[in-house]
Amino acid sequence: MKRSRLLRLVLMGTAPFALTACDEPQPAVVYGSVEECVKDGTLKPEECQTEYARAAEAHERVAPRYTSYQACVADFGADQCQAAPSGGGWFMPAMAGFMAARLLDNRRDRDERYYGSSGFYTSQPLYRSRADRGHWRTAADVPVASRSGKVEVSRYDAKPPAKAVTVNRGGFGSQAAARGFWGG
Amino acid sequence: MRRIALPERPHWRRQAESLGFRFHTFDGEPYWDETAYYAFDRRQIEEDIEAPTEELHQMCLDLVARAVADEAMLKQLAIPEAYWDYVRDSWLSGQPHIYGRMDFGYDGTGPAKLYELNYDTPTSLYESAFFQWLWLEEQLAAGTLPAGADQFNSLQEQLIAVFGYLRERMPAPFYFASCRDSLEDRGTVDYLRDCAAQAGFDARWIAVEDIGASVDGRYTDLEHTVLPALFKLYPWEYMFREEFGPLLPRADTLIFEPPWKAILSNKGALPLLWELHPGHPNLLPAHFEAPGAELKPGWVRKPLFSREGANISLRKPDGETETVDGPYGDIPTIVQAFHPLPRFGDSYTLIGSWIVADNAAGIGIREDASLITKDSSRFLPHIFVD
């Protein structure tokens, strides 16, 4: 047989979204609060405090942003949305948890990877979307955990997304407008 | 290779609408056309199309390796000097590509002849990979096709496999950009997004026109998120010449198709392939053309950059000429030996043969009422039998 065995569409059609596991997982921990983190005991209490603070700081930078309260509520629910502290008329969801991950180059002993003494490398806020209450999701909308504690995530999901202030738009597209391009 | 009439499935338009195929009809004219299909035999598919596709693809990769090391070639291809390092680095660092399409003239006998490469912004993907497949399965189930009929089309499986490979090796989210007002381009990138999502990507759409640039020269989306990875259904030759082009080499965005595709999406690749492989059975003679040269009988003139048949002139051996107007009149040109498309009934038939990663992955067939296949052509499904 020289044709595909089974096809489906998950965005253009009607089938549900499915996420596949990815290789090179990074160890991380996920908690809904500092208290949950302390109780679990994987991190020291002062580490729980530090990683939570880092995630909360990142939250203001990386949280999904909406131009209207209604649009935010549509994705995250009524009790989950607030005006962005930085102003600008933006609305964003509340942080629903945090994930702290160590980015490791080599594969050492599994426990060493979780309990290493050098502290965690990066921390980021997590959110719960209205459509999927069962998972914590990153600001990039990637589901990372359904319960608190140790998880493994991809290297790329272990870091919060980079943000930069846009000063200019429309620098691509002029040739298409001039030449009427529509693919090939 | 035969063209066989077959009644349409009565529900196909409704089905197309519900499955995101919004450009099935174009300006009131059918684009998807299942009033007939093409039937091949296995030998035609495997020996005359699949094997040459893979061989030509390897010749193309070899051409890229030569061109990045040869400034005279980069100059012939009209790639601006400011981007030579950028294009070269993308090749030397092994930046992967996703897909491409070769257009062949083939009538069922003799070697398929390569007309051109669509290696940067190929469209007609959704209808080749998905809708054509759906047509086959439903017609097989309805018993209207020969029992055991198959289709040369593993495009979607191969695309998802490539995205699965990339998912483990590159940053996300993965942005997919097309021009805001093109329904057809949007269909192509939405389909690629769908395949990427099936492989686990957070795959987002952005209009080419909405891409932003930050103070430090990085590309951003409408929420100021830096684009970690971008598939752009937008030609490299345009990007190189636009306002945000100079940011490309340092923008820190992984772009697909990779910059080295600028060498292959270029009609200048055709004379270069002919120089490297003169007399190859799947190539047509081709040469760079001096500006203002007269088009001789038996040759076809093509601008280095051109899409959908625009600005192509052909002069038949008897001297009669046929020309498609277009916006590329200011671009250097090549000439290629005239090799008429085969005619089936009232239609001229072109075979698009797909490469995904480095594998031949299937074909899509387009018909046009003239010898130059344009964006007004129709797409027809195919089968093959043993």
Image: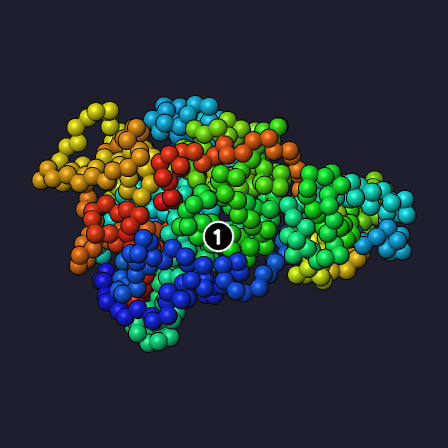
Residue A159 visible in rendering: no
Relative horizontal placement of residue B34, taking residue A97 as reference (left or right): left
Above or below for A54 versus A31 = above
Q: Residue at x 56, y 31 (%)?
A: A168
Q: Is residue B125 above or below residue A53?
A: below
Image quarter of the C terminus of chain A: top left
Hey, which quadrant is residue B315 in on the image?
top left
**Where, by quadrant of the figure, is residue B133 drawn?**
bottom left
Which residue appears at 37% of the width and 34% of the height? A178
Query: Circle 1 is placed at which residue position?
Result: B190
Q: Check disc 1 and report its element: helix, strand or loop.
A: helix
Q: Nearer the viewer, residue A135 or B365?
A: A135
Return the residue found at the far left. Answer: B318
For the residue marked with disc 1, what is the amino acid? Asp
In the rendered view, does B158 fall on the left or right side of B278? right
**Rendering coords of residue A157 (x, y %):** 67, 47
Near-viewer residue (B385 or A131): A131
**How many discs appear?**
1
The answer to whether residue B318 of the structure is visible from this angle is yes
Q: Position of residue B25 (x, y in %)?
A: 34, 57
Identify the chain of the residue marked 1, using the numbered disc in the image.
Answer: B
User: Left or right of B354: which side holds B256?
Assistant: right
- Along the horizontal axis of the image, is B287 left or right of B245? left
Instruction: Tell me what residue is drawn at x 68 percent, y 42 percent.
Output: A89
- Residue at 28% from the left image edge and 31% from the top image edge: B329
- Mark 1 surroundings within 10 Å by alpha-carbon count, few (fewer than 14), some (14 through 19), many (20 or more): many
Q: Give the x, y percent position of residue B205.
A: 53, 47
